[in-house]
Amino acid sequence: MEHHHHPQNKINGKRLLFSILLNIVITVAQIIGGLISGSLALISDALHNFSDVISLIISYLANYLNNKKKQTLSQTFGYKRAEIIAAFVNAASLIGIAIFLAFQAFKNLLNVHEVKSDIVIGLALVGILANGLSVLLIKNDAEHNLNMKSAYVHLLTDMLTSVAVFIGGLLMKYYQIFWIDSALTLLIVIYLIQMSWRILMQSLKILMLFAPSHIVIKEVEIALLKIEEISNIHHVHIWQLNEYDCHLEAHIEFKKDVKLSEFDGVCEMIEKILKEQFKINHCNLQPEFKRNDIKDFIIQD
C-alpha cells in the first residue's frame, strides 16, 4: 500500500475566529433592526448571517479536529472527513434557510406593508462592510479547501445580499416601493440555492464514496493493463477520503507466479501511473495467480 504524505495548506484559525465574532455582531444588529423597521429582507440578511455564524463555527471546529486530532488505533483515518461533513452541513443549511425565506417573501408580497427604510439602509451598509472584510480574510483559504469554500460562499452571498438590501432601502426611502423588500428576498433565495447546490453535491459524492469526477474508470483499466506482467484487474474500488486523498483498491491477476520482489516492482509501476495520470495517491493491491474468482472490473459486493 502506498502513502504519499503531501503537504496540505493550513487554514488561518485566527482570521476565521475573527470572522465568527464579526458575524455574530452583524446578526444581532440586523435582527433587531429588521424587527424595528419591519423589513423581511433585512431579517433575511440576518438569518443568512446567522447561518454564516453556524457554518464558520463548524468550519473552525472541523479545521481544529483535522489539524490537531491524529490517527489512532480506533480512528485509523483520524478526522480527515470532518471538513467534508462541515461543507455538506453548511450547504444544506443554506438551502433550507433559502426555502424558508421564499415562503415568507410570498406571504409578504400578498400583504405589502411600510418599511422604515433608514434603518434598512444603515444596517445594510454595516453588513456590506463587515461581510466584505470577512470575505477578504478567508479568501486565500477558500482557494484550496472545500470546507472554507463553503464558508466563503456563505459570506460572499451575504455581502451581495446586503448590497441588494441597501439598494432596496434606497428605493423604499425615495420612491416608497415597499414591495421591493419581498422581491429582493426572492432573488436572494434563488441565488443562495444556486451557489450552495454545487458544494452540497460535491461534498455528498465524497461522503458516498463515489469516484472523483476527473477519473474515468475505463481509462484506469486500460492504463494498468499496459503493464506486461498483468493479465487482469478486477474488484476495483476508487474513492475520495477528503479533498486531498484519493484511494484505490484492486485485485491484480498476474500472468505467471511471480516472486514477492517482482510484485513489489509491479506495484511501483502501478503507483506511478495512478499518481501521475489519475491523481490517486493511495492504493492497496491484492496479487492473484490462477485464482478462481469473478474477474469483472467492478464487482457487486
Image (tube, rainbow, N blue to C red):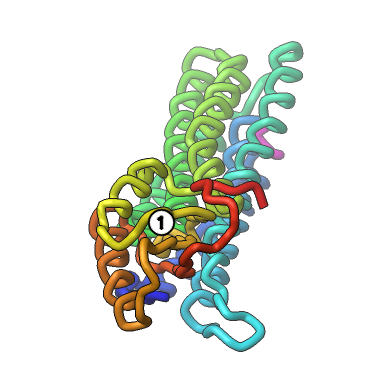
Question: Which of the pair 114/11 is nearer the observer?
Answer: 11
Q: How many marks?
A: 1
Seen in the picture, residue 226 relative to 281 is either above or below; the reply is above
Residue 224: give x, y in percent of width and height: 31, 54
What's the magenta bit mostly, secondary-structure-wise?
A: helix
Residue 115: give x, y in percent of width and height: 64, 25
Instruction: Give the secondary structure at mark 1.
Output: helix
Q: Amino acid at mark 1?
A: Ser
The structure residue drawn at horizontal position 35% and vertical position 49%, both measured from the top left corner, is 220
The structure residue drawn at horizontal position 48% and vertical position 67%, both measured from the top left corner, is 288
Query: Is residue 100 highlighted in magenta?
Result: no
Instruction: Please indicate whether residue 134 sits to the left or right of residue 24 in the image.
Output: left
Question: Which of the pair 140/51 is nearer the observer?
Answer: 140
Question: Looking at the rendering, in which quadrant would you find the N terminus?
Answer: bottom left
Residue 248's quadrant in the figure? bottom left
The structure residue drawn at horizontal position 58% and vertical position 80%, both measured from the top left corner, is 76
Instruction: Please indicate whether residue 265 sits to the left or right of residue 122 in the image.
Output: left
Range drawn in magenta: 35-39
Question: Which of the pair 124/297 is nearer the observer?
Answer: 297
Residue 67: give x, y in percent of width and height: 47, 79
**Circle 1 is placed at which residue position?**
134
Q: Is residue 26 visible?
A: no
Residue 292: give x, y in percent of width and height: 58, 59
Residue 91's quadrant in the figure? top right
The structure residue drawn at horizontal position 43% and vertical position 62%, both measured from the top left corner, is 252
Instruction: Please indicate whether residue 36 sits to the left or right of residue 122 in the image.
Output: right
Seen in the picture, residue 188 relative to 176 is either above or below; the reply is below
Question: Which of the pair 272/28 is nearer the observer?
Answer: 272
Mark 1 crowdedness (10 Å alpha carbons): few <14, some 14-19, many ≥20: many
Q: Is residue 210 visible?
A: yes
